[in-house]
Image: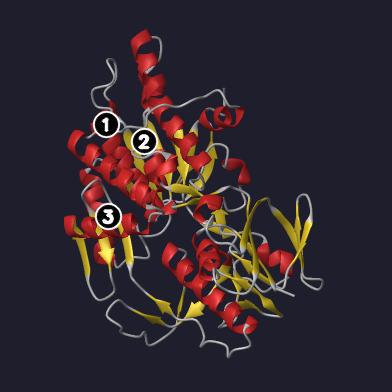
């Protein structure tokens, strides 16, 4: 009987595992609660109107349409019975011989899930649409108040205050792009307010922004953010979020728009298997990325806590193993590795060596022509780093058409300082709740 492989999650890890099994003698089922693969590193550009969702996402069925041994299933996993090798879905159960968990993460509100409706995180295309609407509506309401002359200046200032919680890569990219959006793309669109007067406030509980980057690159990113008009606050712990704004350091900050990027927590996959997890809920896996006690179950990407040796771009091997970061490259390599493990087992071949990571470094954009790059063997910032960032992100986009569209949009935005995607709707209840919980 042909072995049955189930992959849960169509992100970077799950999709690359499926692709790597294209010629393997297995029947493969890829399950995801959304019907698309999303290029998440550029999701913030959808949220700020530079790109549209279909330019950074592709239908999973279309991406895998030529792979004859795979079925794509739109469903959501609710649990796993590992003793019977069954995955429980909302509508039915599926048996498996091998299971790959690539279920990803969600934003961590540190025990305050009630904050989520006031401070959305950026996880999906729906989130990006909601955030874009939330941002644009704030400017519209400020314009309405200023034109009517009935609102106090303090309320107009609150509408034009944007509080971003968390200064990791997503927070820094959102803050810089939002600052440029208000000072360039929207600069001439309003008659009664000055969009450039918008206050973009970035809060980070740690001592510095971009804490995973070397300190000197963090400082360069900080200086560039400040040159864009972003107000950066470090060692600033947010203790409350509501419809009026946030409380940080015991001080109330009135803000109509609060965006969240302060931390992540893993999916419940570890609880499904009663497997050992780290403090964020990631499954602590074996060197071959299998789940301890479950030889035929693997966890990859943001679902897994993986410690592995690394090599950098010039082939230098690390002296000590490191914990894999929660970014695209480790997930891609882990997906391909697990596919190789399964292929070898099915074919009765010797298992591969333990997983090791080809560390290509870290990149973060801090504006339309400025980025920071930590390639391990070289660290630099500015326009050269932005060129590296742009090249890498264009290369990894799914499909030639997507790359061409993104290049054209970037070129248009660079020359005109405009944003193409600036329509929004407040008609859907889910968006209305996010946009104005007090309404």
- Whole-angstrom CA distance, mark 3 to mark 1, is 20 Å
401 w.r.t. 342: above or below = above
Q: Mark 1 points at which residue?
A: 185
Residue 408 picture quarter: top left
Question: Which residue does the image show at 41% across and 22% down from the upper left?
Answer: 155
The spot of residue 190 in percent (x, y) is: 29, 19
Please, what secondary structure does the residue beneath circle 1 have? helix
In front: 28, or 358?
Answer: 28
Q: Residue furthest bottom?
A: 350
Q: Are marks 3 and 2 in contact (CB under 8 Å)?
A: no
Q: In this view, does 102 lie to the left or right of 89?
A: left
Question: Residue 279 shows which numbered tag?
Answer: none
Residue placed under numbered mark 3 in the picture? 390
Contact between marks 2 and 1 (CB within 8 A): the answer is: yes
Q: Name the residue under label 2.
A: 49
- Can residue 33 be seen here? The reply is yes
The quarter of the rendered structure image containing the N terminus is bottom right
Give the alpha-carbon distance from disc 3 to disc 2, as whole Å.
18 Å
């Amino acid at each position: 009987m042909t072995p049955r492989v189930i992959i849960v999650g169509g992100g970077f890890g799950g999709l690359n595992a499926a692709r790597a099994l294209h010629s393997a003698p297995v029947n493969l089922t890829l399950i995801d609660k959304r019907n698309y693969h999303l290029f998440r590193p550029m999701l913030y550009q959808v949220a700020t109107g530079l790109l549209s969702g279909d330019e950074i996402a592709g239908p999973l069925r279309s991406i895998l349409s030529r792979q004859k041994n795979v079925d794509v299933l739109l469903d959501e996993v609710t649990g796993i019975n590992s003793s019977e090798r069954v995955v429980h879905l909302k509508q039915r159960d599926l048996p498996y011989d091998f299971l790959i968990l690539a279920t990803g993460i969600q934003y961590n509100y540190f025990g305050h899930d009630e904050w989520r409706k006031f401070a959305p995180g950026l996880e999906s295309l729906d989130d990006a649409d909601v955030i874009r609407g939330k941002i644009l509506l704030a400017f519209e309401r400020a314009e309405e108040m200023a034109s009517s002359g009935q609102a106090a200046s303090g309320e107009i200032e609150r509408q034009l205050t944007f509080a971003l919680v968390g200064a990791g890569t997503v927070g820094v990219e959102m803050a810089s792009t939002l600052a440029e959006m208000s000072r360039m793309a929207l600069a001439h669109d309003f008659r009664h307010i000055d969009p450039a007067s918008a206050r973009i406030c970035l809060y980070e509980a740690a001592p510095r922004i971009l804490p995973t980057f070397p300190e000197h690159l963090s400082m360069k990113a900080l200086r560039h953010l400040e040159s864009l008009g972003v107000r950066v606050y470090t060692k600033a712990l947010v203790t409350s979020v509501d419809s009026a704004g946030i409380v940080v350091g015991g001080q109330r900050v009135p803000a109509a728009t609060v965006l969240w990027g302060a931390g992540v927590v893993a999916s419940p996959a570890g609880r499904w298997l009663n497997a050992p997890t780290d403090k964020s809920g990631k499954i602590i896996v074996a060197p071959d990325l299998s789940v301890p006690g479950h030889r035929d179950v693997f966890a990859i990407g943001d679902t897994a806590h993986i410690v592995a040796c690394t090599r950098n771009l010039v082939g230098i091997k690390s002296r000590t193993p490191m914990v894999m970061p929660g970014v695209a490259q480790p997930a891609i390599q882990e997906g391909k590795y697990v596919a190789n493990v399964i292929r070898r087992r099915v074919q009765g071949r010797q298992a591969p060596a333990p997983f090791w990571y080809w560390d290509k470094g870290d990149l973060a954009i801090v504006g339309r022509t400025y980025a920071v790059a930590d390639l391990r063997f070289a660290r630099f910032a500015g326009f050269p780093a932005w060129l590296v960032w742009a090249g890498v992100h264009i290369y990894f986009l799914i499909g030639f058409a997507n790359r061409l569209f993104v290049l054209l949009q970037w070129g248009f935005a660079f020359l005109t300082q405009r944003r193409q995607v600036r329509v929004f709707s407040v008609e859907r209840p889910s968006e209305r709740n996010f946009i104005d919980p007090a309404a």
